[in-house]
Image (cartoon, rainbow, N blue to C red):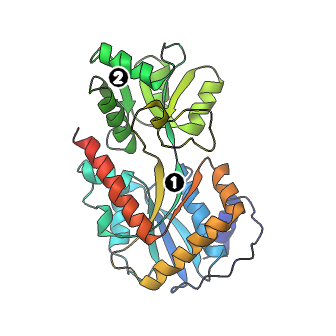
Amino acid sequence: MSKMLTGLLCLALPFIPQNAFAQVDYPVGSVRIIVPANPGGGTDAAARIFADYFQRNSDAVTAVVNQAAGGGVVAAQTVSTANPDGATLLFFHAAFHTANLSGNSPFKWDQFTPIATVTESNEVYAVRVDTPYNTLADLIAAAKANPNTMSIGTQLGGTTQVKAQALNAAAGNTMRIVDAGTESDRVTALLGGQIDVISMSVGVARQYVKAGQMKALAVMNKVPDATAPEIPTTVSQGVDISLPLVQTVYGPKDMDPAAIAAIEALIKQMGEDQAFKALVEKQGQTVALRNATGTSQFLSNEYATIQSYFTK
């Protein structure tokens, strides 16, 4: 890695004191971490935290490479055709599944080597503050009582489409799913009264709740969000929706077992490193660490869950 790139990465992340963990031997000297997202978002932030930890705690240098074109297809192509020696990794989340299931990408998770999960973040279902809905049950009951009159704003083809489909299924398919664009576009449409409910990140939702413009009805998870424990979960309200956005590390098919073992060693250290946990939570995410076996099982379940909403 060049001195300039190393410097930029250090500027992008808070300083973490060097820990006492042993340096992990990695089978190649440099690693490209391919991120199918633009710089500055949650996926990019998580990837840079992972890359920085990787570099500080192993004998390899790392570089984050953003390849947002094609909704993840370009990044997946880069990794699928790379040498499986561990020098090229993919860092992505459930949008990998939605792109495949919606026909926008030929790549499926099991065409790669699942290695680890690193962090997760949550979204909430939010409504305007002037609505009568104070719980998810209130919203669902209103939708069922007035079929095809309430709309969910989403971005078609993305993970928010799945979250909209999940809510609509819980409401007996009585709601309309509307393509309302990016999160900022959805917020504008919600506040402007063009749509009735949206999914949005916990951090952004809390800002609008604090400003007295929105109500956050539910976090889409089985457990409360560590950064917003005051928001009830979907499951606690009797709605079986759990769709956290889990950042996952993949390699090319048949990746070198030595590289997998080395990354698993780093994942184990992350779980014991309180400074790593604090940095992740500062970014509005939580630590969600799995080894290669656990990641394969998680992805199989995650894909099946998302696939079920595409067929409802």
Q: Quadrant of the N terminus?
A: bottom right
- Judge by depth and name the residue closer to the eye, 112 or 20: 20
55 up-or-down from 287: above or below? below
Residue 157 appears at what percent x and percent y?
32, 43
Q: Which mark is residue 43?
A: 1
> Judging from the image, what secondary structure is the residue with disc 1 in?
helix
Q: How many marks?
A: 2
Q: Residue at x 66, y 82 (%)?
A: 23
Image quadrant of residue 272?
bottom right
Residue 191 appears at what percent x and percent y?
50, 20
Q: Residue at x 65, y 23 (%)?
A: 211
Circles 2 and 1, Cβ within 8 Å, touching? The answer is no
Identified by mark 1, the residue type is Thr
Residue 74 in view, yes or no:
yes
Residue 176 appears at what percent x and percent y?
29, 24
Residues at marks 2 and 1, CA–CA distance in whole angstroms: 28 Å
Identified by mark 2, the residue type is Ser
Q: Sequence order check: which comes first, mark 2 or mark 1?
A: 1
Q: Residue at x 58, y 65 (%)?
A: 50
Q: Quadrant of the C terminus?
A: top left
Is residue 22 found left or right of 235 in the rendered image?
A: right
- Say which of marks 2 and 1 sits in front: 2
Image quadrant of residue 29?
bottom right
230 up-or-down from 309: above or below? above
Kindly give the residue lying farthest to the right in the view shown. Answer: 17
Q: Which residue is mark 2?
A: 151
